[in-house]
Amino acid sequence: MRIFAFIAILVSFSLSPEFVRAQDTLDEGDFVAAPDITFDSTSEDETDDEFGKDFAEDEEVTVMEDKYAGQYVEPTLQNISKLYWKKGALVESNDTAIDNYMLINECDIYEKFYKDDFEWQRIREAGREMLKENKANFSQKFKMVVPIDLGRYDMMRKGFPLINKTAFKDLRRVEIGGNSNRQRVCGVDNIIENYPRNLILILNKPFSYEFVQLDEHVAQAFIIRRKYEKIVRPKELENKTYDRLAFARIRITFADYQGETRGSDNFPLAVMFGRLDGIDIFEDAGEKRLLTSVDYK
């Protein structure tokens, strides 16, 4: 199922199953375990397509080549769990951390063998070795795709302002994930020890993005398509009056793990430093029609 991220600025939008929320304040290759057991340790990080399948867009690529396609992963619990290992939040000597990694990423094996003490010990050791050998290869590059609304084209500034409270203003702390703390993960619908389902990103400097610079010929083509092509809105946006709906893909790289805090729902949140790599503007949620791309140093 496609999922998406959303940033709420001033007004908090509650979207599921994936969101990004502005945070103004911060509290405090296959590995063979046995002839009949295998789990994948080197496959690509978990990625899901953005938004619901009811969002109809064609596959045409119109303006620019997407040079970052496939380089950033989504903040699923599976990918976040791997990030914790990548950044040294967990150690191989922690049996519970090994067990819960298997619960999150290898549910079939977990459910089949966890209650068999002797067999599980063998599987745990295999998982320990896999993490030791492969954690350095896990991704630290994540993306969020969020809906934005473009205003009227500014002939002087050559671009569109972001309107309807979809502009990004002085963001420094951002809650990332949108993974429900009550959603069942391999039978568990509560806290998974050592693995906060969501995290707070602290950017190395405040981030603002309020205007989409765009060549007038590209802008005119976009305006015409928005005027005459029917846009099927995903259910999460049915009540939003976005006349010129577009999508911003925010690219970030995580740096250092800083520990845990608690969110407003009293569930744990990991705290991590990171940087904003860039932002890409697409016509569609499927990241097929790239309009423009901005990189940050």
Image (cartoon, grey):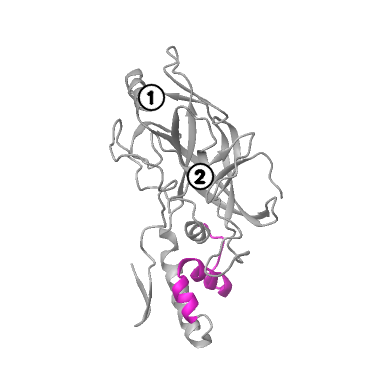
Question: Dot 2, how many residues are within 10 Å of its Cα: few (below 14), some (14-19), or many (20+)?
Answer: many
Q: Amino acid at mark 1?
A: Lys
| In the image: residue 134, left or right of residue 194 | left
How far from the left and from the top, in percent, is residue 199?
A: 58, 51
Which quadrant, please, contains the N terminus? Answer: bottom left
SS at badge 2: loop
Asked whether residue 214 is drawn in magenta, I would say no
As rendered, which of 2 and 33 lies closer to the eye? 2
As rendered, which of 209 and 58 lies closer to the eye? 58
In this rendering, the label closer to the viewer, 2 or 1: 1
The circle drawn on residue 227 is: 1
**In the image, is residue 28 above or below residue 168?**
below
- Residue drawn where x is 46% and y is 66% of the image: 105
SS at badge 1: helix
How far from the left and from the top, in percent, is residue 181?
A: 61, 58
| In the image: residue 36, left or right of residue 266 | left
Magenta span: 87-113
Outermost residue toward the top?
A: 156
How far from the left and from the top, in percent, is residue 15?
A: 56, 45
Instruction: For marks 2 and 1, give the CA distance.
Output: 26 Å
Q: Amino acid at mark 2?
A: Ala
- Residue drawn where x is 45% and y is 76% of the image: 109
As rendered, which of 248 and 127 lies closer to the eye? 248
Residue 259 in view, yes or no: no
As rendered, which of 115 and 128 lies closer to the eye? 115
How far from the left and from the top, in percent, is residue 148?
A: 49, 32
Name the residue carrying label 2: 5
Question: Dot 1, how many residues are within 10 Å of its Cα: few (below 14), some (14-19), or many (20+)?
Answer: few
